[in-house]
Amino acid sequence: MSDLIIRMDAVKCNECGRIFSVREAGLQGYAEGELHVRFFACPHCGRLYNAGTTDGVQRELLKERGMLARQLQRTKTEDAAARLSKLWSETEEKMEARRAELTERGDRLLSARRGRI
């Protein structure tokens, strides 16, 4: 039997090329104004990776999605479930439409703060 352990959270660093575990590297957070960035760093070279970026609007949409999910679990009628599912989809579309811009803003913030986070 091999001693090699394959992990689902293993990533190869784009900068140094070494493989590491995201779980072991640890997810961290950084905020500047309304922008909150969740990130992890390569433990070998320090390269920062954006795991997710939100602002006030995105966090409100996340809360709304959670509320809709709870309501959907408790709903008793098909009509109510269909209405809630439609609202869920609309919320997801709004979040997805903002995701690329937020990721780019988070990447810029991490790049500017490298070595100071």
Image (cartoon, rainbow, N blue to C red):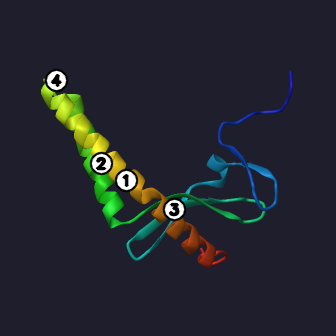
Would you name the residue on which mark 4 appears? 78
First in sequence: mark 3 or mark 2?
Answer: 2
State the residue at coordinates (42%, 70%). Answer: 35
Amino acid carrying label 2: it is Thr
Q: Are marks 1 and 3 in contact (CB under 8 Å)?
A: no
Tags 1 and 4 in contact by the CB under 8 Å rule?
Answer: no
Marks 1/3: CA distance? Answer: 12 Å
The x, y position of residue 33, in whole percent, is 40, 77
State the residue at coordinates (78%, 60%).
44
**Residue 51 percent coordinates (x, y):** 55, 55
Question: Dots 2 and 4: beta carbons under 8 Å?
Answer: no
Residue at numbered disc 2? 91
Residue 36: x and y, percent?
A: 44, 66
The image quarter in which residue 115 lies: bottom right
Do labels 1 and 2 touch, CB within 8 Å? yes
- The image shows residue 17, relative to residue 108, as above or below, that is above
State which tag comes first along the sequence, 4 or 3: 4
Distance Cα–Cα, label 1 vs label 2: 6 Å
Instruction: Say whether marks 4 and 3 touch (CB < 8 Å).
Output: no
- Using a 10 Å C-alpha cutoff, classify the residue at mark 2 as few (fewer than 14 neighbours), some (14 to 19) or many (20 or more): some
Q: Residue furthest right?
A: 2
Of residues 23 and 8, the one drawn nearer to the viewer in this rendering: 8
The three-letter amino acid code for the residue at tag 1 is Met
Instruction: Give the amino acid type for the residue marked by disc 3 in the picture.
Output: Thr
Mark 2 secondary-structure assignment: helix
Which residue position is annotated with label 3?
103
Residue 45 in percent (x, y) is at 77, 64
Residue beneath label 1, please?
Answer: 95
- Asked if residue 109 can be seen in this view, the reply is yes
Q: Which one is nearer the viewer's eye here, 83 or 68?
A: 83
Instruction: Please state if 114 lies on the left or on the right of 56 as rendered.
Output: right
Q: Is residue 76 visible?
A: no
